[in-house]
Amino acid sequence: MWEVVQEPFFQMALLNALLTGCLCGYLGVFVVLKRVVFVSVALSQMAALGVAVGFFMGIYPRVSAMAFTMLGIILLAMPYSEKNTSRESILGYIYAMAAVTAVVLIAKNPIGEAHGLDLVCGNVLYTTQKDLIMLIVIVLAVVVLHLFYFKEFIFVSFDRDTAQTTGIKPGVFEFLLYISFGLIISVSMQTSGVMFIFASLVIPAMIGLCVARHIFRVFFSAVVSAAVCVTAGFYVSYVCDLPSSSTIVLFYGVLFLSVKGITFLAKK
């Protein structure tokens, strides 16, 4: 095991998964608090469509993934009349159309078909130096954004109406929050896959909310649980010759059930 850890490809893949998992774990707390889990699913599928379009048109997949993810964010940010077209129905429309369009494009392109499974399950071991540099840039950008506006993001996530009465513009900060989701989703989709991104945006946050009550401890627990599962998942996937991203998601699930069980028994 130590020999493969020293290999550059393994180090880049592990760092990619750790950065993606930890940042998604942090952002996932906002996803769960705002109850917009399906938003993360829809944006993940839009990013997957962008990757499929990239393969189909012969352009850099991450560029097209970012473009389509931003398009999804713009569609979600538009005002809709709840009487005629609700936001939830738009989410369903975006997810369904992005999913089927990606399938059609993959089926009509030999290169895309070869990477079709990776869009769902991911293959983080294919991480290149260019992928890692782009991911680091995006992670730093999101971190800086949240350092400046963390209190506002928390406020609009907990109580949107009260935030508006205090002078905070919820629409602006919700849009910036969705931009944060979109950036990490689009830049990670090609190597990490839909399932790893979606699971990282939901399950570590659920774990954090189970084990902590103070908001900062919730964020800390979510990030730590993501880091532990990513590291353990990588080790097990190598030893047992399993898909790395899927194995990490399994560890997410097992850790959540374990934490939930322990907290349930502790209350008795």
Image: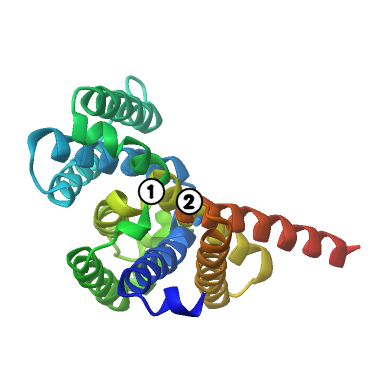
* Marks 2,1: beta carbons within 8 A: yes
Q: Which residue is mark 2?
A: 243
Label 1 crowd (10 A; few <14 / some 14-19 / many >=20)? many
Q: Amino acid at mark 2?
A: Pro
What x and y, as percent, mark residue 116? 32, 35
Q: Which mark is residue 211?
A: none
Element under disc 1 = loop
Q: Residue at x 20, y 22 (%)?
A: 108
Element under disc 2 = loop
Viewer-proximal residue, 16 or 167? 16
Task: Indicate the quadrant where residue 91 lies.
Answer: top left
Q: Which residue is mark 1?
A: 122
Looking at this view, name the residue that lies furthest to the front.
3
Viewer-proximal residue, 3 or 91? 3
**Of pointers 2 and 1, the one earlier in the residue sequence:** 1
What x and y, as percent, mark residue 185? 31, 53
Task: Indicate the quadrant where residue 113 lies.
Answer: top left
